[in-house]
Image (spheres, grey):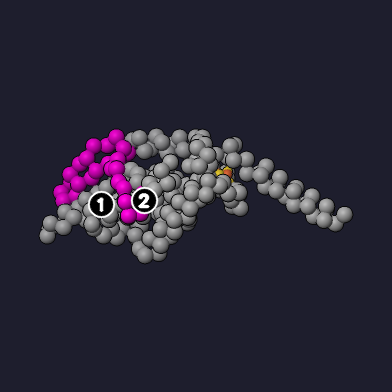
Amino acid sequence: MDENLLPLSALQHYAYCPRQFALIHTEQLWADNFFTAEGNVLHARVDSGLPEQRGHVRSERAVEVSSALHGIKGKMDLLEIETMPDGVKRYFPVEYKRGKPKLADWDRIQLCAQALCIEDMHGVSVTEGAIWYWEVRRREPVAIDSVLRQVTLGVIADARALLRSQKTPPPTTEKSLCKACSLRDLCMPDSFRSDKSERYVSSMLSGQS
Ligand code: SF4
């Protein structure tokens, strides 16, 4: 992968688990599970929609975006462009997700990165967007504020640094994330953790003898 152009989806992978990011983008591994397969079906359905105009709002789907400034590129599910009475255009990104709203920032980071691309491409300011969650059939508004921007820029920088290092970090300490991860069989986080603890115990014992 060209490390200068990180895919938007890779940012979500990194935010979810840096090891997952490295397995996919450095080691080129991938596996689908129920969650990713369901997500693929959702995105295929969303992406196949035609552009439409309703009043002052134009909706475009599967929009290719990129930012040379931030070194990111990808495809947005939906971009709503509202033409205001004075002719100024207001851009509103919408991302579709199969699950439900989360406390963690994974989904919001991907949306914010889309907003950064739109700003760079059109010379505008994007202040809000939304994530539509399939499981609860609800649109969650997301403020593209300074806090989310800083988190997103940090993830872009950290993900690029990890890619450049070509290293794969150890499994996340949050075991609950592994349950929903499609790479679990390839990652083998439990084996990694137990191997590490066995080596720790061995080193302790050898140090005592
Ligand atoms: S199984 Fe767990 S540690 Fe491994 S990549 Fe997935 S989330 Fe990360």
Three-letter amino acid code at disc 1? Met
Residue ranking furthest to the right: 209
Kindly give the residue lying farthest to the bottom in the view shown: 146
Q: Is residue 113 visible?
A: yes
What residue do we see at 74% from left, 48% from top?
Answer: 199
Disc assigned to residue 84: none
Residue 173 as seen in the image, left or right of residue 125: right
What residue type is disc 2 on?
Gly
Indicate whether residue 109 is drawn in magenta. Answer: no
The magenta-colored residue range is 46-72
**What is the x, y in percent for residue 69?**
32, 55
Residue position for label 2: 71
The kind of secondary structure element at disc 2 is loop
Q: Could you tell me residue 118's position as x and y percent? A: 28, 52
At horizontal 41% and vertical 36% (from top left) the residue drawn is 40
**Residue under pointer 1:** 121
**Quarter of the image that includes the C terminus:** bottom right
SS for callout 1:
helix
**Which one is in front, 4 or 32?**
4
- The mark total stands at 2
Q: CA distance from mark 1 to mark 2?
A: 12 Å
